[in-house]
Amino acid sequence: MHHFKYRHNQLCCEGVSVQAIAEAAGTPVYIYSAQTLLDHYTRLVHAFRSIAPLVCFSVKANSNLAVLRTLVNAGAGLDVVSGGELYKALRVGCDPQRIVFASVGKTEHEIREALRVGVLLINIESAAELAEVERLAAQLGKRAAVALRINPGVEVETHHFIMTGAHGHKFGMDPDTAEALLRDHARFPHLDIKGLHLHIGSQITEAKPFVEAITRVSLLVEQAVQLGVGLEYLDIGGGLGIVYREEEKPQTAKEFAQAVLPLLKQMQLKVILEPGRFIAGSAGVLITRVLYLKETAQKTFVVVDAGMNDFIRPALYGAYHDIQPVVADAAPQQEMVADVVGPVCETGDTFAKDRKLPVVNTGALLAIMGAGAYGFTMASQYNSRPKPAEVMVRGEKYFVVRRREKLQDLIRQEVIPQELWQ
């Protein structure tokens, strides 16, 4: 469900014409619906209301400050995976006690900053990292609240790049390693092992792997009690899938909650959720303009001004995204089959292959749907292309929440030392 709908054949975001935004802000441009963000956050909170979880939005999905502030103001916490994301979380006023910090490779500086501000939990990925957090906490005279991230060895049906909970992946620790650390918790006098953490992947459309993972970790919860470790939290991560194609029917928040709540209630721990895509995915679109129609003997190409540097998911994952005209024909008579491609000098710079579309002309605006998660956050300046603008819509108004980069932004941090040629 989202708030991008056609009115009088014009695609609108809430109460604002998408075409009007594109003409004013230029293209390519990301457009976000504040109401869609809030609706999906509220839906998850409501589904789990019987256990009152802490819902920490996954900042890696969409780190725009306006997006984060919208959710924090609604009561969300934040899940961060870098010092930069922690910085952004604090900038939007998120209480550090509503921030959880994950990442396989936290640097010394990042750990120090997490300890300094007092995040709720530092999610520990390995025995080596636990020792490092203990060392730094001792230096700073702090007690660190940590959760052990468990790799439960659960396979999920999703793209292999976004599977994170199976054996052989870099994430988390196996249950035996976690048990050993729980058994030796007294060796870490500056740490409080307060929780266990799971995150088995992304774009997961059924509850079964979550149930399996939670069931496996419940055994560790029992062992922790026997070992005298005072666990308070179980962080079950994120990963809920959304609709990218009409034929997909991923589980709803209600269906997910019905499947896992019985297990969670048995463990009697405070529950943390880390949704990202579920909240932001359908809350954003990428608007691009058709530059050329290119006919070859083999196929038709629709060449647009957005590239894989602006939105890499189709190139990186082969991800499907619906593509719709911003101005629709009231009575479409003709269709075309084409590849929708960008200007970047890579064959992989393709948003759709052999896609059936309404006939479009040069200058037309297209909306790449479901681009609110892992869109701008994965953008780059590849081919020396400035990053696009971002716009937030709320009701009848829209606001530029990130200005389009200019050419001078491409070289802002570069230096040409004259000594190189002396």
Image (tube, helix red, strand yellow):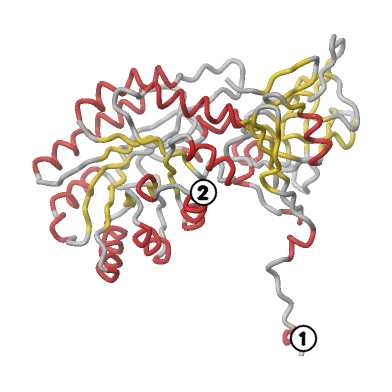
Say whether marks 2 and 1 touch (CB < 8 Å): no
Q: Earlier in the sequence, mark 2 or mark 1?
A: 2
Q: In which quarter of the image is residue 47?
A: top left
State the SS at label 1: helix
Pick the residue in front: 177 or 417.
417
Residue 290: x and y in percent read 85, 34
Q: Please state if 51 lies on the left or on the right of 304 as rendered.
A: left
What residue sits 42% from the left and 35% below the top?
Answer: 238
Callout 1, which amino acid?
Trp
Vertical placement of 21 versus 148: above or below?
above
Residue 168: x and y in percent read 37, 45
Q: How many labels does the image show?
A: 2
What residue sits 43% from the left and 44% below the top?
Answer: 79
Q: Please state if 151 lies on the left or on the right of 13 as rendered.
A: left
Q: Mark 1 points at which residue?
A: 421
Q: Distance between the residues labelled 2 and 1?
A: 45 Å
What residue sits 14% from the left and 46% below the top?
Answer: 229
Residue 198: x and y in percent read 33, 39
Residue 92 - label: 2
Callout 2, which amino acid?
Val
Vertical placement of 125 versus 202: above or below?
below
State the SS at label 2: loop
